[in-house]
Amino acid sequence: MKQQSGFTLIELIAVIVILGILAATALPRFVDLSDAAEQAAVDGVAGALASAAALNHANNIANDAGLPTQTALVSVAACPDVAGALEGGLPSADYVITPATAIAEGATGACVVTFQGRTANFTAYGVTP
């Protein structure tokens, strides 16, 4: 008589139940990642704007000290002006930078970038070339 080998029906059902439980707990974590992705996109743009503003400010300080700079200064008198310092500009016209209040030369301003209801903060530096 030959002995058969393989899995029993009970073992197969147990594996299917375990996989179902794992899928039920892991799936909700990955289903709605679009909100997190949109917020990450806005955070990334805010970080880029903050870096561009800081570099523009540093170039302005170097220029005022009589040191040669390799990039042209961008005049920043309000938060929306920082987009001009961002190489390539904003990724979309749907990004809105507020507030538009005046920022004096060398002063800082708290700014907010908004995209599809998501917001992120960055700091702008006033620059008058």
Image (cartoon, rainbow, N blue to C red):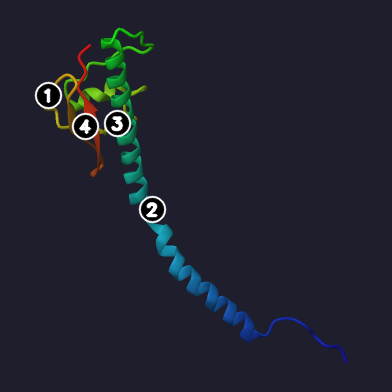
User: What is the number of the mark on residue 40?
Assistant: none
Pointer 1 and pointer 2: residues touching (CB < 8 Å)?
A: no
Image depth: mark 4 or mark 2 in front = 4
Name the amino acid, label 1. Answer: Ala
In terms of sequence position, does the residue under pointer 3 or pointer 2 come before the other?
A: 2
Residue 20 in view (yes/no): yes
Query: 10 Å neighbourhood of mark 4: few (<14), some, or many (≥20)?
Result: many
Question: The C terminus lies in which quarter of the figure?
Answer: top left
The residue that label 2 is drawn on is 33
**CA–CA distance in space, label 4 to label 3:** 12 Å
Pointer 4 and pointer 3: residues touching (CB < 8 Å)?
A: no
**CA–CA distance in space, label 3 to label 1:** 17 Å
Image depth: mark 1 or mark 2 in front = 1
**CA–CA distance in space, label 1 to label 2:** 37 Å
Q: Nearer the viewer, residue 112 or 5?
A: 112
Name the amino acid, label 4. Answer: Ile
Q: Quadrant of residue 59?
A: top left
Q: How far from the left and from the top, in percent, is residue 105?
A: 17, 19
Name the amino acid, label 3. Answer: Ala
In terms of sequence position, does the residue under pointer 4 or pointer 1 come before the other?
A: 4
In terms of sequence position, does the residue under pointer 3 or pointer 1 come before the other?
A: 3
User: What is the number of the mark on residue 97?
Assistant: 4
Q: For the residue labelled by badge 2, is the local secondary structure a helix, a strand or a loop?
A: loop
Q: Quadrant of residue 128?
A: top left
**CA–CA distance in space, label 4 to label 2:** 25 Å
In terms of sequence position, does the residue under pointer 4 or pointer 2 come before the other?
A: 2
Describe residue 118's horizontal placement relative to residue 25 as left or right: left
| Farthest-out residue, left | 101
Q: For the residue labelled by badge 4, is the local secondary structure a helix, a strand or a loop?
A: strand
